[in-house]
Amino acid sequence: MTGYLDRLFRLRERNTSVRTEILAGVTTFLTMAYIVVVNPAILQPTGMPIAAVAAATCLSAFIACVLMGLLANVPIALAPGMGLNAYFTYTVVIGMHVPWQTALGCVFLSGVAFLLLTFAGIRQLIVQAIPRQLFAAVAAGIGLFLAFIGLHAAGIVVAHPATLVALGDLSAPPTMVAVLTLLLTMVLQAWRVRGAILIGILVGTAAGWAAGLIPPQRAAYDLTAMSATAFHLDVASALQIGGGIGVGLVEIFFVFLFVDLFDNVGTLVAVTKRAGLTNPDGSIPSLRRILFADSAATIVGSLAGTSTVVSYVESASGIAAGGRTGLTALVTGLLFLVALFAAPLVTAIPIAATAPALIIVGGMMLGALAEIDWNDPEIGIPAFLTLIMIPLSFSIANGLSFGITTYALLRIARGKAQRSEWLLYVLALLFVVRFVYLTAGA
């Protein structure tokens, strides 16, 4: 069996083992298992049954991770995306009074569009048009993003009306557990202990249980619950929003397509870079297969009955644990399948136990900053804006928007624009249109 897995996932070629990949898959799953509870809670106001959405969340994540693992052989896990699920609920369904079945139809259409763009090679061209040093800035920016999410989830950093953020109450039980877990993980990392992040999560979970931090238990979900949302999407109605192919459909489709595209590009770049899977010239091997798996995942999610499925930046935690192949993603997917029938056990993992993993991984991703030529303003300024806007605007897409637009403007201002870079300037123009759209909708 080990020999078969070695040949299938090229384990020795990537200097890893079955044990390491399993460990990495478990680590990735534990850091993103919160989606099993959070996604249904966010989609519930639409009128979608919470048990059905939970089942759809687990099943779509399982299929998406297996697709990514077997088809692309990269350690990237997928699940319904945060942010896009909130947009689905509060802007599309509640704000625009679109039935959730119709909204799922819009998700399906955006997935089909992604698939067509992938087959046409356009998504690959977009990735290749972005300067390599901006990729490094994206990776580091996502690292700051992850660390900020982890610090906030741990209660170490909290919102403040005067200073925007402030130090939290370190004496609060959840924060104390998170701090102790963080310290343990740091020590284990310093001693080069294999599986340090996973050990930290498990010890933090035990400490959280001892401190009474077990989240509210929910009933187990099964495949039959999903029948309330599976295949309930209404594509025909989606095409009639606003009267034919109207403004309403264009608006919804644009947001689903644009945010998913550039969030995924940012995540893909950061994660593959962290895993050492990029070529010497900065290009990504098997890019077409990765993007195909990503596109298919969104279509599967809409059919199952959930919002857009995306690549998860938490995959970096599994990579930090040693994951280098699709076996990591496969293990994560199988654990989501188990979660379908054992949701109460999964949701018993307190956030205080997983938040430190995000902080540690975020810090490790900042190493990419060394690849940027900060002495060159033409790359240093766009790289800085990319780096800082990702965590401060809470959006990978916004960081990319600022970085690419600034880079293109500086190239034009210096008279260095070239015809071969035409797609870069098209992207910059699209980002400007996006900013105008966001401003008009504010």
Image: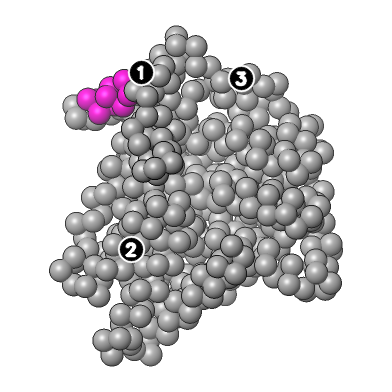
The answer to whether residue 66 is above or below residue 251 is above
Q: Nearer the viewer, mark 1 or mark 2?
A: 1
Q: Is residue 69 left or right of residue 316?
A: right
Q: Position of residue 227 (x, y in %)?
A: 81, 38
Stretch in magenta: 177-188
Amino acid found under the numbered disc labelled 1: Ser
Q: Which mark is residue 171?
A: 1
CB within 8 Å, label 1 to label 2: no
Dot 3, crowdedness within 10 Å: few (<14), some or many (≥20)? Answer: few
Q: Which mark is residue 216?
A: 3
Q: Identify which residue is drawn at 28% across, 90% down.
A: 415
Where disc 3 sits, the SS reads: loop
- By secondary structure, the bulk of the magenta-drawn segment is best described as helix
Q: Identify which residue is drawn at 45% across, 51% down.
A: 394
Q: Is residue 328 left or right of residue 40?
A: left
Q: Is residue 179 magenta?
A: yes
Mark closest to the chain's N terminus, 3 or 2: 3
Pointer 2 residue: 385
